[in-house]
Amino acid sequence: GAVVSQHPSWVICKSGTSVKIECRSLDFQATTMFWYRQFPKQSLMLMATSNEGSKATYEQGVEKDKFLINHASLTLSTLTVTSAHPEDSSFYICSARDPGGGGRTDTQYFGPGTRLTVL
Amino acid sequence: GQSLEQPSEVTAVEGAIVQINCTYQTSGFYGLSWYQQHDGGAPTFLSYNALDGLEETGRFSSFLSRSDSYGYLLLQELQMKDSASYFCAKGGTTDSWGKFQFGAGTQVVVTP
């Protein structure tokens, strides 16, 4: 299957600082990437859709000024958590859409996730 | 709220067969995917159904009935390593850039 990497895998930061998380598709071009957050024992909550070369589309209730998304190339999207607070501590997961074709299905491949802890 | 419903937990013994059902609301339906997630890990893709019928991938099979707005994931010959959470995900329409909505997940516990 397709490979998506995410960096860093975990980060601990002080309240008020900003944290940048990178998501890369390694073996295919992803015009669309998605950012999710997941709390323990809960499902994935979509935060935003990131399209290469355009502004991200945020889900209702997600602050776009707090969670900055940049999709600079067909293989890289970044999520920056600005002025992080303890309530932002969560597991952040990106996915990259493979639209399919050539026998492949239209689906999403997930990065390994980033565990953010804000002290 | 959730537009996909799946059981919260299923327990079974090694070697058994488990079926995880998923019912969904039809708005914006484009396909049903299944993902496995182990504790602390990221979801991994298992299977996808865009059309009615059964898709078989090794020990795992997935089924979809669009007329019933229903699908299931079948896990056969259960192994201890299959203990994980399983999510069904409804794919969005092409207008929504393939956006997925996930069910709450089913925790599968495999016992010796």
Image (tube, coloured by chain):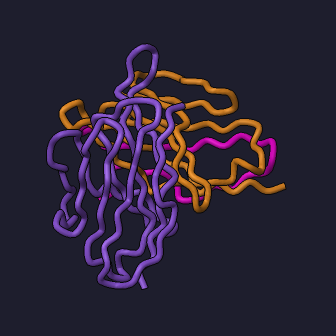
Chain colours: A purple, B orange
Displayed quadrant of residue A1: top right
Q: Nearer the viewer, residue A53 or B112?
A: A53
Location of residue B89 in the rendering, given as x and y in whole percent from the top left corner? 41, 43
Q: Is residue B66 left or right of residue B105?
A: left
The magenta segment: B1-28
Q: Is residue B22 left or right of residue B92?
A: right
Q: Is residue A52 left or right of residue A5?
A: left
- Total tally of numbered discs in the picture: 0
Q: Is residue B26 magenta?
A: yes
Q: Is residue A10 above or below residue B67?
A: below
Residue at point 41%, 75% (across, down): A89
Location of residue B108 in the rendering, given as x and y in whole percent from the top left corner? 64, 54
Rendered-image quadrant of the N terminus of chain B: bottom left
Residue at point 62%, 26% (across, down): B57
Q: Is residue A94 magenta?
A: no
Displayed quadrant of residue B41: bottom right
Location of residue A39 in the rendering, given as x and y in whole percent from the top left corner? 44, 68
Q: Nearer the viewer, residue B91 or A49?
A: A49
Displayed quadrant of residue B49: top left
Location of residue A16 in the rendering, given as x and y in whole percent from the top left corner? 29, 83
Residue at point 61%, 55% (across, down): B38
Q: Is residue B91 left or right of residue A4?
A: left
Q: Is residue A105 above or below residue A75?
A: above
Q: Nearer the viewer, residue A59 or A113?
A: A113
